[in-house]
Image: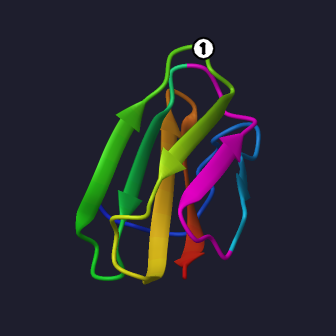
């Protein structure tokens, strides 16, 4: 599945993302083990892809991305969840 959607698709725990809106760094917590974090711009272009192992907390620097609407897709073996983020 390479399309973006805002459906939960049985991901499991709901990841927490903050701050939203964000300026430079986003903090993601409550991640399931072995998750993949993908960040897309508003046209669906993949800006960043990161994998976690056992971390439940992750920080990502978004300062190099253009300002505007971003989509975070967090996936693992249980499914995926896509969330909106505003980069100011």
Q: Main secondary structure of the magenta part?
A: loop
Residue 8 falls in which quadrant of the image? bottom right
In reply to whether residue 25 is colored magenta, the answer given is yes
Vertical comparison of 26 with 68: above or below: above
Choose between 45 and 58: the one closer to the eye.
58
Residue at the (53%, 63%) spot, across then down: 24
Residue at the extreme top of the image, as rendered:
54
Q: Position of residue 4 (x, y in %)?
A: 39, 67
In reply to whether residue 32 is colored magenta, the answer given is yes
Residue at the extreme left of the image, as rendered:
45
Q: Position of residue 61 (x, y in %)?
A: 47, 52
The residue stretch that appears in magenta:
21-33
Residue at the (50%, 26%) spot, across then down: 77
Residue at the (60%, 14%) spot, across then down: 54
Choose between 73 and 70: the one closer to the eye.
70
Task: State the quadrant of the C terminus.
Answer: bottom right
Residue 7 falls in which quadrant of the image? bottom right
């Amino acid at each position: 599945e390479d399309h973006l959607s805002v459906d939960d698709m049985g991901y499991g725990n709901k990841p927490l993302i903050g701050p939203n809106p964000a300026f430079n760094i986003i903090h993601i917590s409550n991640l399931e083990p072995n998750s993949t974090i993908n960040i897309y711009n508003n046209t669906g272009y993949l800006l960043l892809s990161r994998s976690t192992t056992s971390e439940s907390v992750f920080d990502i620097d978004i300062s190099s991305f253009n300002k505007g609407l971003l989509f975070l897709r967090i996936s693992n073996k249980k499914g995926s969840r896509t969330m909106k983020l505003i980069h100011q």
